[in-house]
């Protein structure tokens, strides 16, 4: 059973940016949006495995740096007309600290 | 709060298009009411011809159904003709007494068909061709009557005649002119057209003046008589002899009209609360009768109605196509020419092809294509943008694809390509896939095709081919957008030019400020506009606007190129391609220390370390810095390399120190961000070993000084650089090159290489501001130096700032 772990301070993630979390199951990208919402996705684009953590964040989406697919941060789904999905992880922010369940 | 009220009179193509543009940029600005004299919602009038020909049906040509009006909260009065505008009370009154008040009024009443003033013009069976009612009347007549006469051999007349023929009538076209479509075609093309229409069974009477229409026993029209006494049977007469702007309403309310409602460049009438667009309008003395210019008016008008005040309508050049299936005809501009123009003509009567291009002062000013119109939109683009064609004149006639294009030379007609042929080499998309997507998903624009198929979405070299496929699949409804007018991205309707201007004039210094001032649709913009905005801000206000790393593509944020597996490549700068044993040792050492999988010499005279892990980057940079090396910006929309040759120091032919010159230029331009990447080269003699002829700025040394060439490109589509000027000293080389690059930095659109920038603004413009105007040149150069005055090595910055954290993974 995976449990909540304290990851970092919210400020450690750049606004409209991300950090990479090393994980035995593969890297996880943790994103911070404009309104300080935080999302976590498997750091692999459903297209050809591009590192989503390195993309540009806008609204609640990230654009993959390799071939510019847009991925919904909340669902991990590619924005139409592209099709594909990447795994999501639970994250939450409490008292300015980011918690991740993976 | 009460919203201001906008009333539109005229529920047609131009008026509703204006509303669509307005809703896109200011969805909640107005309470909107629409009056339409016809009983239908807005439909595509252009497609009445395919409806008449039996190729489409009325429901298929509706553009905005009733649900659209409801969804956008628009109050719609159909079948109500407005008869009065009370400008004092600010009210409009319809025939049935309906009254609506307005704060802004938009008139888009279109035009009325002109009816020849001859006896019998009001008999039953005599109609015009303008709306659904007319089209229905023709379809009905074809069921029960035999002889149709169409008066007028223009576009509309021929489309009507073709449709009636297809519906089984015996059709004669009567025309006063010496040949068909004399306003669109020259005589040769006009005769070829007549011949192919005759082969389809149409009859023609040219240079005939109609005297009267004669009634039969039933009271319906039965015959037509000409001034020369000839008379032929006619139980349906369609008048297609021209249109007149419908100004009745405007005139009766005292708005200034002169062959159209007179409007300014902001589409305002003499009453500032009243705007007008479409065929009813006279703009700078011209009333247009085609939709493309009306749509341009709609866009500008919407912008002013929304209160943005950017953009002026400055008139349009129009082009026409005849919508008769199986006949390819295209004409644009001044195709007749005159004493000061030159013609290039290709005529193959047996093959049914005729092409005539009219040139004036090295620019294309008009053209007629018959039989093979594949290059029509390309010619039209050249014409509209006023490009200098002297360089490509000898193969201009053979079309765009004959100019050579590394992506797919050989195919010059999209229509002739097999479905299995690959169109986009980057994404492996075939013609069949593109055509299928266009048809099934109802795509109309290049952008939509890009989104759905990925064709031309990467390097873009097949854009022209994709546009051709689009044009041949959707036909006349396709309009290629002019690059200068295209919206920046889906977040806004404003073009790059308009945004640059707004940033400068309104002194906007941050991305949120732009997004707010220009009412972006998405609060953080998107991956397309943010990098562009970031560049515009830092280049316009160099020491004032703050760079936003989060709005840069990862390469520019990480100062290294991302690779397909998520690792990075590192390219240290080697000034002018010159290195030293110490630098080479430092490179060898880091390659060993960080286990770099590949060390490669680049095409830019330096060394690339490929496959480096992100977390190693800051450490590697620190090691390289020890040996005095800085970033090569191989990742940026920025200065890349200055290639040099050995020059006079060693080479037996060298005339000047090209290596030293290259190093000086590279140092001057260090850390320069630009709309797209910038590459220079300096060669020591005209043998040109540094390939100066295909660089953004290419310098060629000669015995008496230096030649400066600009706007070359060695990439996707090779383009030779153009000669700018010759100078005597190394100082001048720096001043002229720097001034040119600064002009490009200030005027270029994001992702526009110098070659495309100069194609857009013209070399004359560049020469005027850089070569001829000394003060301006010095000022440009000074602004460049000022913006680079505290340039720092980005690799060094990253070793200290908190941004460094981005390079360190978190552990779990
Ligand atoms: C490393 C290098 C190839 C090599 O191994 O030699 C290279 C590698 C890339 N080029 Fe290049 N180009 C390299 C020299 C060139 C040259 C030759 C030159 O500079 O003399 C050209 C043609 C000259 C020109 O630009 O006019 C060239 C024309 C392009 C283009 C087409 C640009 C265009 O406007 O037509 C692109 C695509 C783009 O920029 O949008 C591109 C893009 C790329 C990118 C950055 C693709 C990308 O976006 O990821 C490649 C990065 C590969 C990687 O994984 O790191 N590369 N590229 C060369 C680096 C030179 C350097 O030292 O900085
Ligand atoms: C058969 C045909 C084929 C064509 N083919 C082409 C083509 O291939 N390419 C091209 O570019 N153009 C073509 N055109 C021309 C194009 O359709 C017109 O340029 C365009 O529709 C003009 O738009 P508009 O909004 O100015 O006028 P319209 O579309 O005519 O709209 C004006 C509307 O205002 C209504 N109206 C007028 N007065 C009042 C009033 N007082 N109160 C309420 N409502 C009023 C009218 O009933 C009408 O519905 C074609 C036209 C026709 C008829
Ligand atoms: S290095 Fe340049 S030419 Fe080679 S694959 Fe990459 S972009 Fe294409
Ligand atoms: S790998 Fe992400 S878009 Fe191709």
Image: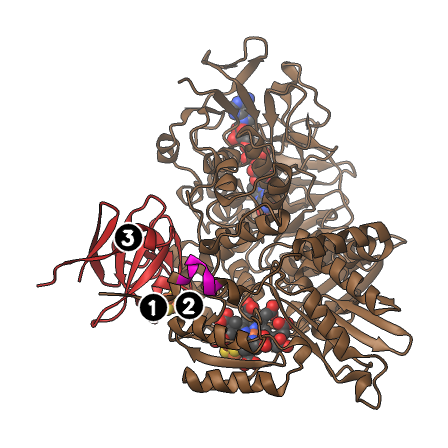
The quadrant the N terminus of chain B occupies is top left
Q: Secondary structure at mark 2?
A: loop
* Residue receiving disc 2: A66
Relative to B77, residue B198 above or below: below
Which residue shows up at 50% across the image and 45% down it?
A: B511
Q: Outermost residue, top direction?
A: B89
* Residue receiving disc 1: A47
Whether residue B461 is visible here, answered yes or no, is no
**Residue B281 included in the magenta stretch of the image:** no
Q: Which chain, by letter, is red?
A: A
User: What residue span does the magenta drawing correspond to?
Assistant: B798-804
Q: Nearer the viewer, mark 2 or mark 3?
A: 3
The Cα atoms of the two marked residues, 2 and 3, are separated by 29 Å
* Residue receiving disc 3: A9
- Report the side of B374 relative to B737 (left or right): left
Q: Which chain, by letter, is brown?
A: B
The Cα atoms of the two marked residues, 1 and 3, are separated by 31 Å
- Residue B724: give its label: none
Is ligand 4 within 8 Å of the beta carbon of the residue shown at mark 2?
A: yes
- Report the side of B570 relative to B205 (left or right): left
Measured from the top left, where is residue B545 in percent x and y? 56, 46
**Chain on which label 1 sits:** A
Check chain identity for marks 2 and 3: say if they share one: yes
């Amino acid at each position: 059973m995976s449990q909540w772990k304290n990851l970092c301070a919210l400020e450690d993630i750049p606004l409209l940016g991300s950090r990479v979390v090393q994980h035995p199951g593969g890297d996880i990208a943790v994103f911070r949006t404009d309104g300080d919402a935080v999302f976590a996705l498997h750091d692999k684009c459903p297209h050809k495995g591009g590192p989503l953590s390195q993309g540009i964040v806008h609204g609640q989406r990230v654009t993959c740096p390799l071939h510019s697919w847009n991925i919904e941060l909340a669902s991990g789904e590619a924005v139409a007309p592209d099709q594909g999905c990447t795994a999501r992880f639970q994250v939450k922010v409490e008292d300015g600290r980011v918690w991740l369940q993976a | 709060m009460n919203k201001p009220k906008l009333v539109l009179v005229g529920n047609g193509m131009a008026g509703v298009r204006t509303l669509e543009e307005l809703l896109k940029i200011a969805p909640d600005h107005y309470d909107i009411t629409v009056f339409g004299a016809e009983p239908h919602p807005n439909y595509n009038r252009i497609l009445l011809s395919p409806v008449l020909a039996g190729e489409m049906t009325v429901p298929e040509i509706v553009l905005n159904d009733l649900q659209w009006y409801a969804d956008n909260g628009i109050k719609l009065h159909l079948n109500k003709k407005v008869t009065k505008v009370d400008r004092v009370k600010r009210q409009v009154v319809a025939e049935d007494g309906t009254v609506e008040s307005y704060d802004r009024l938009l008139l888009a009443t279109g035009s009325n068909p002109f009816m020849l003033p001859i006896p019998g013009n009001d008999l039953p069976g005599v109609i015009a061709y303008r709306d659904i009612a007319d089209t229905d009347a023709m379809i009905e007549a074809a069921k029960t009557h035999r002889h149709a006469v169409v008066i007028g051999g223009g576009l509309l007349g021929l489309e009507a005649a073709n449709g009636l023929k297809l519906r089984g009538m015996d059709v004669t076209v009567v025309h006063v002119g010496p040949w068909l479509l004399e306003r669109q075609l020259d005589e040769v093309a006009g005769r070829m057209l007549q011949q192919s229409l005759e082969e389809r069974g149409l009859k023609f009477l040219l240079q005939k003046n109609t005297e009267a229409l004669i009634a039969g026993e039933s009271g319906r029209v039965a015959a037509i008589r000409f001034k020369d006494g000839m008379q032929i049977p006619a139980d349906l007469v369609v008048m297609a002899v021209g249109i007149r702007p419908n100004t009745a309403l405007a005139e009766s309310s005292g708005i200034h009209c002169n062959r159209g409602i007179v409007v300014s460049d902001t589409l305002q009438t003499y009453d500032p609360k009243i705007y007008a667009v479409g065929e009813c309008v006279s703009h700078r003395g011209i009333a247009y009768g085609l939709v493309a210019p009306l749509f341009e008016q709609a866009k500008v008008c919407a912008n002013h109605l929304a209160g943005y005040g950017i953009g002026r309508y400055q008139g349009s050049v129009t082009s026409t196509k005849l919508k008769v299936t199986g006949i390819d005809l295209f004409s644009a501009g001044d195709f007749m020419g005159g004493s000061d123009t030159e013609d290039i003509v290709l005529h193959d009567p047996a093959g049914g092809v005729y092409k005539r291009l009219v040139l004036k002062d090295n620019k294309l000013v008009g053209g007629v294509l018959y039989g093979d119109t594949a290059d029509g939109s390309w010619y039209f683009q050249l014409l509209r943008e006023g490009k200098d064609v002297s360089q490509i004149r000898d193969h201009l006639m053979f079309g765009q694809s004959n100019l050579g294009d590394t992506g797919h030379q050989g195919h010059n007609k999209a229509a002739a390509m097999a479905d299995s042929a690959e169109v986009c080499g980057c994404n492996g998309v075939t013609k069949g896939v593109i055509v299928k997507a266009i048809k099934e998903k109802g795509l109309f624009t290049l952008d939509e095709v890009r989104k759905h198929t990925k064709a031309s979405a990467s390097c873009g070299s097949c854009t022209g081919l994709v546009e051709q496929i689009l044009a041949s699949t959707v036909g006349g409804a396709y309009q290629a957008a002019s690059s200068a007018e295209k919206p920046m991205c889906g977040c806004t309707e404003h073009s790059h030019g308009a945004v640059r201007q707004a940033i400068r004039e309104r002194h906007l210094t941050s991305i949120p400020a732009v997004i707010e001032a220009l009412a972006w649709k998405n609060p953080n913009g998107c991956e397309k506009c943010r990098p562009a905005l970031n560049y515009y801000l830092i280049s316009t206000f160099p020491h004032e606007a703050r760079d936003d790393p989060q709005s840069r593509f990862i390469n520019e944020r990480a100062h290294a190129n991302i690779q397909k597996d998520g690792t990075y490549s590192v390219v240290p700068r080697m000034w002018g391609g010159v290195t030293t044993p110490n630098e080479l040792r430092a490179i060898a050492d880091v390659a060993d220390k960080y286990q770099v999988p590949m060390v490669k010499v680049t095409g830019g005279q330096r060394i690339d370390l490929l496959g480096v892990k992100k977390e190693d980057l800051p450490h590697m940079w620190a090691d390289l810095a020890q040996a005095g090396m800085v970033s090569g910006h191989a990742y940026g929309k920025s200065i890349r390399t200055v290639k040099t040759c050995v020059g006079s120091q060693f080479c037996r032919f060298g005339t000047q120190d090209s290596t030293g010159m290259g190093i000086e230029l590279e140092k001057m331009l260090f850390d320069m961000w630009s709309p797209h990447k910038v590459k220079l080269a300096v060669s020591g003699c005209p043998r040109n070993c540094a390939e100066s002829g295909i660089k953004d700025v290419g310098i060629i040394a000669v015995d008496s000084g230096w030649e400066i060439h600009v706007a070359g490109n060695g990439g996707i589509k090779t383009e030779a650089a153009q000669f700018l000027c010759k100078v005597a000293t190394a100082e001048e080389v720096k001043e002229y090159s720097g001034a040119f690059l600064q002009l490009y930095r200030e005027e270029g659109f994001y992702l526009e290489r110098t070659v495309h920038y100069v194609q857009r603004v013209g070399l004359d413009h560049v020469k005027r501001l850089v070569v001829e105007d000394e003060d301006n040149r010095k000022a440009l150069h000074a602004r460049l130096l000022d913006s680079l005055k505290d340039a720092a090595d980005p690799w060094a910055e990253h070793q200290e700032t908190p941004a460094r954290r981005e390079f360190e993974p978190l552990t779990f």
